[in-house]
Amino acid sequence: MLGMNYKLKGLEESGQPILTGIVGAGQMGRGLVGQMMSMKGMRPAVVADVALENAKTAYDRAGLSEGRDYYFARTVEEGDRLLAEGRFVASENSELATKCRAIHCVVDATGVPEAGAKAAIDAINNKKHIVMLNVETDVCIGHILYKLASNAGVVYTGSAGDEPAATIELFDFADALGFDVRVIGKGKNNAVDYGCTPESVAEEAKDKGASAKMICSFKDGTKTMVEMTAMANATGFLPDVMGAHGASGSVKDLPDLLSLKSEGRGGILNSYRTVEYVNGVAPGVFLIFASDQQDVNHELQYVKLGSGPNYALYRPYHLTSLETPLSVARACLDGMPTIVPRAGFVAETGTIAKRDLKAGERLDGIGGYTVRGTFISSGDAKEKNALPLGLVNGDTVMKRDVKRGELMTYADVDLDQYAVVLQLRKLQDALFI
């Protein structure tokens, strides 16, 4: 079978590149546009962002010129005409990325559950593959989106380059070889600050050229919780404790650190087949495995993977949106997803109050001032009536007081009944949960 590089080269030579619609032109979206412009056989044909200047900036930085290479369009009809002329299209209207006839695949790079829900549904309804560079949407409604896409004959998938997909690469490798996979997880490269806000990280965000809300979602732990939820739903592995242990260590520490307490090797775990994060091994992802075969253990020790019985595999990088084009290519050329919630509804990203919240108060959402996420098994989430973080937005209103650090429930809030993500979640709950 040809490697993806050869397949893409063939598309380039035949003059039939994959035309991609990108929704969201923040830091991740801009990186994606630039990477696609460097590739054969693929084009970032439409870039849509609610702030048009972001879409224009993405094209400008990728070396394209407005009025020569790319043009602004408001309607799908305008977009269709420009694409037929071989132009690139910038727009404030996400429907150009999801509905224009020439588009083969859509990437949602917004990081916003409501925006991701709309982009995914529009793409699926218009028979286009959908790549979610938006794990926040996937962990809330990925099960129903995966089912709807399958029924429509298109691919729904998470993105290569995100830590869940990088972990699944390790998992699929070890699982195919018949190893006993015991733990999967990721490193974390900044200390958790549960109370951080966009204001408190504003200077850091400015220095990094990133959104303050995005940096805040990293530092308050939400992004890690979301990513572990996606890993769980892809594999069936569970949180050992709500929120995971979050121990500290180096790569060489992982085999013993992520062993059972009962095994007497200084481990932190109560059970195996779990998902964890470890401070100090960022920016990579890891997997802990074992074997019951004597000669296999001898060879693992011979190749210096450790003394056993647990061994660690470690991928020391993930290139975020720069790897996303590979998921686009795999969906379009092989009809295959990179990562999906194949194991079913195993885990949830629940909602924790970031500070004391009062009845009548309006919430914000991921990376904001009022709430953060936690990693919880679906069984515990159902028992506790836990509120999925992806349903919280600026129109969510508190019905009663909740203390800082408490797990929030559906009974605590009035949700935005007009939100697409809520309607899809209700359907998902009725069908799958």
Image: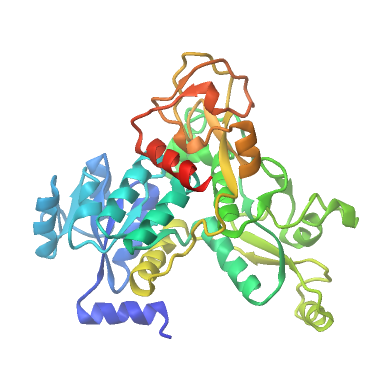
Q: Position of residue 378 (x, y in %)?
A: 61, 43
Point out the residue furthest to the right here: 264
Is the image coloured rainbow, by chain, by secondary structure, or in one colour? rainbow
Q: Residue at x 38, y 37 (%)?
A: 423
User: Dividing the image into 4 quarters, which one contains the N terminus?
Assistant: bottom left
In the rendered structure, the answer to whether residue 264 lies left or right of residue 137 reads: right
Q: Position of residue 398 (x, y in %)?
A: 49, 19
The answer to whether 109 is drawn above or below residue 195 in the figure is below
Q: Position of residue 207 (x, y in %)?
A: 45, 41
Q: Position of residue 35 (x, y in %)?
A: 35, 63
Point out the residue furthest to the front here: 430
Q: Residue at x 63, y 32 (%)?
A: 384
Asked if one can make out residue 277 in the rendered structure from this viewpoint, the answer is no
Q: Residue at x 27, y 60 (%)?
A: 127
Asked if one can make out residue 99 in the rendered structure from this viewpoint, the answer is yes
Q: Residue at x 68, y 40 (%)?
A: 242
**Closest to the observer, 387 or 24:** 387
Number of marks: 0
The answer to whether 397 is drawn above or below residue 45 in the figure is above
The answer to whether 338 is drawn above or below residue 198 in the figure is below
In the rendered structure, the answer to whether residue 90 lies left or right of residue 283 reads: left
